[in-house]
């Protein structure tokens, strides 16, 4: 995991810390293993919100992620994606999400100047294989978070393997920021930086957790170096896309980001 939700900082004085904790909205956390990774949903203000609505929204968010997994998983033989690869299912007959995600992948390639591309070299040397998994996670978590945004008087944070989206329902009042620690890619026991989110997203790409799994689309070879790239902005989908592009080529990626997405900020380590 390259980012982790932490509690807000409080005074070092014991009484001040206790008072701050007493004033902080109550918080609950749910965790499920979905899409091959732990996904946690953190909700503040649960005592002010209808309890049943909170629990229903959380259940719907996880159900949304499981539906996405059934369509796009590259590890499930019965997913639409794998059936399409084997020629058992046409794209026209696949879930409508497939067309939506394909269009987003094309847009991502265009926006990043080709630093993000949803293809993998075929293992037999044939035509490239469409692989949208680098975009699907952010897109899926954004969709799941929409269920939480319907619940009044809460704020929430969803952590999907280190990629994080924060938001709030209506009438949430003043929002307390979620603090996100960005780990040092060269020493994962250390926090290199922190980011505060009230509404928005943070995504990190790198090789520290999973090795050289990110492919440079210009060469077809994995990016085999240390480091990471973190991007913050309004959309988790696009933060994740830009983080990948920046890790592939920090210099070209930064120039593309500044030109195409000025609402996003980056940290390259």
Image (tube, rainbow, N blue to C red):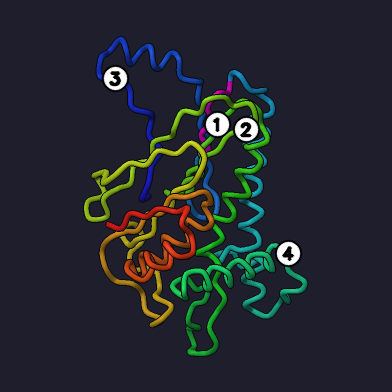
Q: Which comes sooner in the sequence, label 1 or label 2?
A: 1
**Rounded to the nearest whole Å, what is the CA distance between mark 3 and mark 2?**
28 Å
Q: Where does the image place residue 85, in percent across and percent down from the top left?
A: 62, 77
- What is the span of residues highlighted in magenta in the rendered image? 41-46
Question: Is 267 or 188 nearer to us in this picture?
Answer: 267
| Residue drawn 67% across the image and 65% down it | 100
The residue that mark 4 highlights is: 95
- Which residue is at 29% across, 71% downward? 224
Res 11 label:
3
Residue 38 visible to an observer of this rendering? no
Q: Helix, strand, or loop for circle 3?
A: loop
Quick check: is 42 in the magenta stretch? yes
Q: Earlier in the sequence, mark 4 or mark 1?
A: 4
**Which label's residue is closer to the chain start, 3 or 2?**
3
Residue linked to disc 2: 169
Mark 2 crowdedness (10 Å alpha carbons): few <14, some 14-19, many ≥20: some
* Marks 4,2: beta carbons within 8 A: no
Residue 155 tag number: 1
User: Quick check: can you spot residue 18?
Assistant: yes
Q: Earlier in the sequence, mark 4 or mark 2?
A: 4
Q: Quadrant of residue 213?
A: bottom left
| Mark 1 vs mark 2, CA separation in Å | 6 Å
Residue 186 lies, with reference to residue 222, above or below; the image says: above
Nearer-the-camera pick, 52 or 168 = 168
Q: Residue at x 65, y 49 (%)?
A: 64
Of the two numbered discs 4 and 3 on the same chain, state the one appearing first in sequence: 3
* Outermost top residue: 15
Q: Is residue 101 left or right of residue 92?
A: left
């Amino acid at each position: 995991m390259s980012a982790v939700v932490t509690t807000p900082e409080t005074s070092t004085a014991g009484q001040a810390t206790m008072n701050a904790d007493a004033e902080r909205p109550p918080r609950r956390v749910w965790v499920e293993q979905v899409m091959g990774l732990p996904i946690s949903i953190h909700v503040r203000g649960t005592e002010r919100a209808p309890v049943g609505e909170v629990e229903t929204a959380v259940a719907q968010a996880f159900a949304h992620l499981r539906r996405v997994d059934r369509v796009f998983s590259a590890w499930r033989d019965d997913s639409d994606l794998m059936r399409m690869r084997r020629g058992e299912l046409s794209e026209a007959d696949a879930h409508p999400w497939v067309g939506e995600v394909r269009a987003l992948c094309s847009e991502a390639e265009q926006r990043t100047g080709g630093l993000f591309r949803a293809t993998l070299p075929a293992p037999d040397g044939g035509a490239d294989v469409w692989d949208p998994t680098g975009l699907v996670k952010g897109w899926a978590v954004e969709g799941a978070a929409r269920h939480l945004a319907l619940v009044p008087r809460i704020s929430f944070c969803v952590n999907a393997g280190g990629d994080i989206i924060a938001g709030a329902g209506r009438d949430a009042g003043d929002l307390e920021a979620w603090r996100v620690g960005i780990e040092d890619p060269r020493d994962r026991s250390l926090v290199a930086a922190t980011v505060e989110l009230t509404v928005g997203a943070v995504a990190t790409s790198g090789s520290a957790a999973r090795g050289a799994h990110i492919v440079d689309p210009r060469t077809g070879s994995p990016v085999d170096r240390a480091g990471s790239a973190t991007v913050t902005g309004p959309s988790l989908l696009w933060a994740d896309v830009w983080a990948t592009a920046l890790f592939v080529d920090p210099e070209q990626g930064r120039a593309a980001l500044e030109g195409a997405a000025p609402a996003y900020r980056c940290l390259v380590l």
